[in-house]
Amino acid sequence: MFAVIISYHLNTVHGAVLHGSRAPGQPTIKATLGRRACDERRAEGITESICSMIERDLMPINTVDGAGFQDLIAILEPGYNIPSRPSITSRLEARYEKRKSELKTTLATATAVALTTDCWTALTTESYITVTCHYNDENWQLKSAVLTTTNMSERHTADNLADNLNEVVETWGLSGRVTACVHDNARNIVNANNPTRVTWKSVACFAHTLNLAVNDGFAAAGVSRAIVAAGRLVKHFHHSTIATKALGEKQQQMSLPPHRLIQSCKTRWNSVCDMFERLVEQRWAVSAVLSDRSVTKLADARTLELRDDYWQLMEDMAPMLGTLKCATTVMSAESEVSISNTYPITFSLINNHLGAADGDSHKVAEFKERVRDSLGERMKIKSDDLDSSTPMVATMLDPRHKHLEFLPPATRISAHSKLLEMATAERDSVTATGAATAGDGNTIQTAAPQRHGATSAMSLLLGETYSNAHKGGVESEVEIYLKDPPALLESNPTCWWKVNEGRFPTLAKLAKRYLCTPGTSVPSERVFSAAGLTVNRLRTRLTPDHVNMLIFLNKNI
């Protein structure tokens, strides 16, 4: 009855407004009544979702000021008032502080962590250093996080880099728990991770080291000229829309995959391999385009066309470069243990894949020899300290590689002795810590052994401690561990340790400390791609603090 009365009143008294005769800009009553109210709870949810969108997709914060975004929200939720850019910024800052606090709490429970670091320059010419950390949690799950992306305006000297790394470690409460830092082979960062400046071990990025060895091989075998010529050819297709269109037509005519040619880049690992493989795949389509005078001028064709020996060289090099690419890919995995694969892969490349083969051409054989020598030298495979290096210790703690069959017998014995030495030191450290705890008044109560009946004759003759003489001894633990059959290559080392931690408690502590170390500095270098989206031409006014905040939120979701 009430609704009928209201309807009658609106039609008789406010009919003009109700049916469209109103002042310009004044909404109709129907439009006003049809607008759904957005309550406080729903509005808060939408605002949080907008913040999450900016985090996950690395959207500019001023997206909320965009007319298109505002029109979209007006359609989806007409009653919602979009917060201003400063308001969204404040919310992101609060989320950053909260997530940073949560990560600190999580890292406080980690027994050991490893770091990776690298420097990069933004579009604004500002220099940044990124530090990531990696650790095994209580369930042997490999975890990682970006700690910081800090503006570094001072010179990148070893002292300044070391000071920056030490400050990050102290800020995050990681002092005394950093096992190693993985970095590239630049002299300044290598010197920054020297024992005189930091308390952790220095580990060179395997992928960067392998790339340097491969470049040495290119230079020695005269492959560089073929790379330059191939790069010039690819550049022509990338810059000519006519040539690119013609290539697509030739690919279709020849039933070739419609693939785009790939350009090599000195700073991109394996890019030469990708360029060679793609050119070999598209050789006849490329040649057809260069032979078509309606597409390519004769003078250009003479400059661009590759010599037959270059084509043959690319084809001969492809399998070897593919193997080296596979090694880089395996070592760059972030979600799996990789540091322990360093030396097994290194020795396999040197002793098997880079060895001379009957069908090798002169240039391929020369390339293999130079890469083999360079890789062995850079990886210090003949060093007296090989068995104490972080990758080798990790290899011994990986149940897949613990037998060290790739090493000479004398080196293998030395390495296993080093493992026993480290395990003994770990046991003594735990014992000393327990004694210190007891000395502080926190006495650990130990249950007295129970006796079941009278002492047996054998116990009387041989002594009650006969059976337990070596039980729990670290020597026995290491011996049994090494004698156990190795795990399958496809198995996960951390899963193995989760199951066998009770059998080898001392070695498990070492494994948790060393196996969290990445084999490459890829984790910190992959931040560059996110940074490129963050510091772009639309956001050149971002402060370094906000660059750090946005990358942190994006990478630590």
Image (spheres, rainbow, N blue to C red):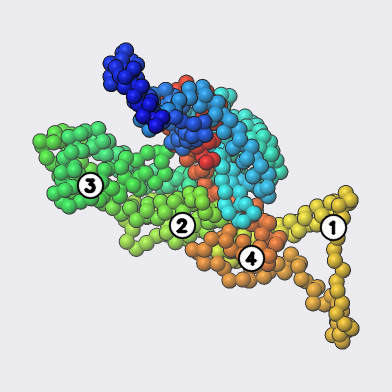
Disc 1/disc 3 C-alpha distance (Å): 71 Å
Residue positioned most to the bottom: 457
Mark 2, other Cα within 10 Å: few <14 / some 14–19 / many ≥20:
many
Q: Nearer the viewer, mark 2 or mark 3?
A: 3
In this picture, residue 51 sits left or right of residue 155: left
Cβ–Cβ under 8 Å for marks 4 and 2: no
Q: Is any atom of residue 55 visible in this view?
A: no
Residue type at tag 4: Asn
Tell me if 499 is positioned left or right of 363 in this view: right
Nearer the observer: mark 4 or 1; the answer is 1
> Mark 2 = which residue?
349
First in residue order: circle 2 vs circle 3: 3
Instruction: Tell me the number on the disc at residue 500.
Output: 4
Identify residue for label 1.
Answer: 444
User: Which of the two discs, 4 and 1, labels the residue nearer the N terminus?
Assistant: 1
Q: Residue 258 shows which numbered tag?
A: 3
Given the image, on which type of amino acid does mark 2 rest?
Answer: Leu
